[in-house]
Amino acid sequence: MIAQVMAGLAHGVTYSMGALLSADMAGDAWGGAASTVTTVGAALWAMPLAAIVNRRGRRASLSIGLALGSVGALSALFAAQSGLYPFLLIGFFFLGAAVAMNLQARFAAADAADERHKGRDISLVVWSTTIGAILGPNLFDPTERLGDALGLASFSGAYLVCIAAQWVAILVLQIMLRPEPAPVAAKGKQPKANLREYPVVASAIITNAFSHFAMIAIMSMTAVHMHGHGASMTLIGLTVSFHVGGMYGLAPVFGWLADKWGARPTMLLGLGGTFIAAALLIPWSGNETIVVVSLLLLGLGWSSTLVGSSAVVAKAAPPEQKAGLQGRSDLTMNLTGALGGVIAGPVVSMFGMPVMAVLVIVLMVAVLAGTSALRRRAGHAAR
């Protein structure tokens, strides 16, 4: 949990700042590249980091993810100073490893959790990201002043804070994560899981993936959208803080709901929050207050879906396939998130945020229909 605080700070201080830096270097249409490449990196790093869990344990896997993220922050800092945009994309890709670590930590909690409290323990680790993730965006102005004092390019001072926070997290993991949680799966090579055999797990993975798509698609362009409407850096930072607070702050509530009410209803509750957030953006995307409220609801929807779907996977996946299916969940989640970032930049640049919101609503309806069909299939199979 302490490491998650630092990882959240590192991610929070660079996430939207990366969009601004990318747009500053390559134009507004490239503002979504920060989240896109980062989420592609998180997806592609998810499976190797999951494999490390079976070979060397959670401590090594989480620490390596953070170390790779610090390499990414250093590359982004170099790109800003040199004006070489490809190094910025490389930096975003390696920062994705730290995002994969951040997500994987919830499964470390699930490994050690009692069956009755998986939702609670997952949510506590998710919640612990809140402190750093909320603090991070509010360091926009201080990190800019730090960068100016050191003679750094605009929007690049945040990466110094990112590197420092990541290495503090690595130190904490190496010293304090003892005994480390171990995956339930037996050692050795396991056969690749076929999701068709596990429709309940598949429905959770698809729902979580869509939620992440919606969050990335809307969130990745919010800073650029607000900046284009003349919003101050302070207001942009406050909006991001509300959003990130929604993502993590009430996670324990959703964990309690997952244990008491059920993991699947909690997961579907999150889709409702996403729908409302997107609907708010359609007519009033230029109203700063409505944008703040919408981003808060979007964060709450993401949190509820993440906690609920993670509990479904942790409970429904067979022991011998658990680590692999957890990695598959994060892989799918981040690939769809990357797609959201790819779409968001051009769509918002050409048509505006309301069109992006309509697209999110249409896809949500399709996902609800698809996952309901998978659940019915699981019910028929059980009978």
Image: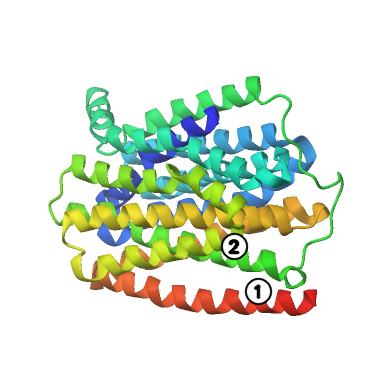
For image coordinates 24% across by 73% down, the residue present is 351
> Residue 209, located in which quarter of the rendered image?
bottom right
Q: CA distance from mark 2 to mark 1?
A: 10 Å
Rendered image: mark on residue 66? none
> Is disc 2 in contact with disc 1, using a CB cutoff of under 8 Å?
yes
> Residue 158, located in which quarter of the rendered image?
top left
Most foreground residue, 100 or 32 = 100
Which residue, as the protein is rendered here, is positioned at the far front? 260
> Residue 17, located in which quarter of the rendered image?
top left
Residue 322: percent from the left, percent from the top? 75, 53
Residue assigned mark 2 = 264
Rendered image: mark on residue 375? 1
Residue 196: percent from the left, percent from the top? 74, 73
For the N terminus, give its image quadrant: top right
> Which amino acid type is shown beneath numbered disc 1?
Arg
- Give the secondary structure at mark 1: helix
Mark earlier in primary sequence (2, 1): 2
> Which amino acid type is shown beneath numbered disc 2?
Arg
For image coordinates 41% across by 58% down, the residue present is 216
For image coordinates 33% across by 74% down, the residue present is 358
